[in-house]
Image: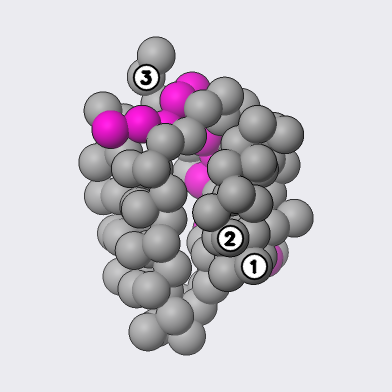
């Protein structure tokens, strides 16, 4: 399954809505989008993962890299609406303590 990305602006920052699976095949698309937004925006990037059904280590790696990049700019990556199976991956890896998850 592919990963669809939709971008919109909110009062809290730039929102990216993801739909699909975040794996080795779709991760480069997300990486390009996140890094571009971090470079061009001075606000937080909010990633709505309500429709993400699966994430693997490649997807986690994209988020970790994006978080490092955003911290250097003084912004943040916020993850929201994680399904239980996706949130479990963040919990198992300890990344739930690194990311702001809503």
Seen from the viewer's position, the closer of residues 101 and 17 is: 101
Q: Which residue is mark 3?
A: 2
Query: Badge 2 local density, few (<14 within 10 Å), some, or many (20+)?
Result: few
Q: Which residue is mark 2?
A: 94
Disc 3 is placed on an element classified as loop
Residue 62 lies, in percent from the top left, at: 35, 52
Disc 1 is placed on an element classified as helix
Q: Quadrant of the C terminus?
A: bottom right
- Which residue shows up at 61% across the image and 27% down it? 51
| Residue 4 appears left or right of 40 | right
Residue 22 lies, in percent from the top left, at: 42, 32
Marks 1 and 2 close (CB-CB < 8 Å): yes
Q: Quadrant of the N terminus?
A: top left
User: Predominant secondary structure in magenta?
Assistant: strand
Q: Is residue 79 magenta?
A: no
Marks 3 and 2 close (CB-CB < 8 Å): no
Residue 65 lies, in percent from the top left, at: 34, 63
What segment carries the magenta color?
Answer: 12-24
Answer above or below: position of 21 versus 33.
above
Q: CA distance from mark 3 to mark 2?
A: 27 Å
Identify the disc placed on residue 35: none
Answer above or below: position of 64 versus 4.
below
Q: Earlier in the sequence, mark 1 or mark 3?
A: 3
- Which residue shows up at 41% across the image and 62% down it? 64
Query: Badge 1 local density, few (<14 within 10 Å), some, or many (20+)?
Result: few
Q: Which residue is mark 1?
A: 97
| Residue 72 appears left or right of 83 | left
Visible residue check, residue 102: yes
Seen from the viewer's position, the closer of residues 2 and 43 is: 2
Q: Quadrant of residue 50?
A: top right
Q: CA distance from mark 1 to mark 3?
A: 28 Å
Q: CA distance from mark 1 to mark 2?
A: 6 Å
């Amino acid at each position: 399954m592919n990963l669809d990305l939709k971008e919109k602006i909110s009062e809290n920052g730039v929102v990216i809505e993801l739909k699909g699976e975040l794996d080795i095949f779709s991760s480069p698309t997300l990486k390009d989008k996140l890094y571009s937004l971090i470079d061009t925006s001075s606000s937080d990037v909010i990633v709505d993962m309500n429709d993400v059904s699966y994430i693997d280590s490649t997807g986690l790696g994209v988020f970790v890299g994006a978080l490092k990049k955003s911290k250097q700019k003084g912004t943040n990556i916020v993850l929201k609406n994680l399904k239980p199976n996706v949130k479990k991956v963040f919990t198992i890896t300890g990344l739930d303590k690194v990311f702001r998850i809503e």
